[in-house]
Image (cartoon, rainbow, N blue to C red):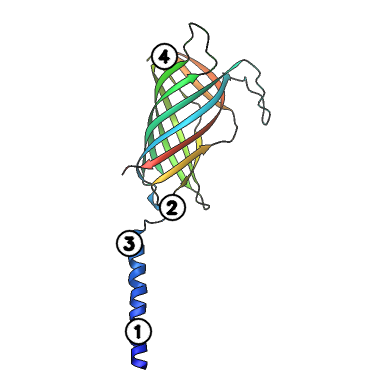
Amino acid sequence: MKRIFTLFSIVLILIIVSTTCVLAAGQRPAPIQLLRGQWATIGTTSCVQTDAGGIGASPQFQLLSSGTTRVMQEAGTLNLFFGGTGSWVSNGVLINYTLIESGSYPVSGFTTECDVTYEPWPDGTVKFKFDNCVTSYTAGYLGSDTQSGNSHFRAEFAQISHDGFTMVFWDLEPRVERIWATTGGITTYFDRICSRTKTAIQLR
């Protein structure tokens, strides 16, 4: 009887170990370790924009000069490399809700390219920095000779799904961003406050 009990215990241990190994093999590593590869992104950015110096101090952000409201929808590709670096390329459409009079140009098409760095935090959040972003316009009033970009990096935060295949991004802290636009060799600066949300799905 004692021998039977011993054999049963051994078999039970083997079953537990083998089941654990199978489950472990079926699971992906911790999501933060999978932060690489190519990701498809889609997202929306909403902004209030005015001339440089046209937005007052936090937390009121009172407009000091006339502004416009606009929304941008973008679909792109996020490439993440080892070492916390990457790149992002997107195509998008900008709709300026303020330009509704006859003869106005409320819609612009554009492409954007950015350098990317990312840093995992202990709580599982990942801080992304989109830097050296340059936007080129493909449709609308702004012609192909116009480019624009941020005067500093743009921070976004992300959480990764448990299986490591999906990321949800957000940038919901109100702050003034300085941007530039160059047309025909003439550069103009603007200030804006934006909110951003984005979803990324890993392709490979």
Q: Residues within 10 Å of mark 3 (few under 14, many from 20)?
A: few
Q: Residues within 10 Å of mark 1 (few under 14, many from 20)?
A: few
Quadrant location, the C terminus: top left
**Mark 2 or mark 4, which is nearer the start of the sequence?**
4
The residue at which mark 4 appears reads as 140
**Mark 4 or mark 3, which is nearer the start of the sequence?**
3
Amino acid at pointer 2: His
91 or 13, which is in the foreground? 13
Q: Tell me, for residue 25, which label it has, or none.
A: 3
Q: Tell me, for residue 16, which label it has, or none.
A: none
Above/below status of 77 relative to 120: above
86 or 195, which is in the foreground? 195
- Element under label 1? helix
Label 3 vs label 4: CA separation? Answer: 52 Å
- Element under label 3? helix
Point out the residue furthest to the top here: 103
The residue at which mark 2 appears reads as 162
Q: Residues within 10 Å of mark 4 (few under 14, many from 20)?
A: some
The residue at which mark 1 appears reads as 8
**Mark 3 or mark 2, which is nearer the start of the sequence?**
3
In percent of the image, x 34 and y 82: which residue is there? Answer: 10
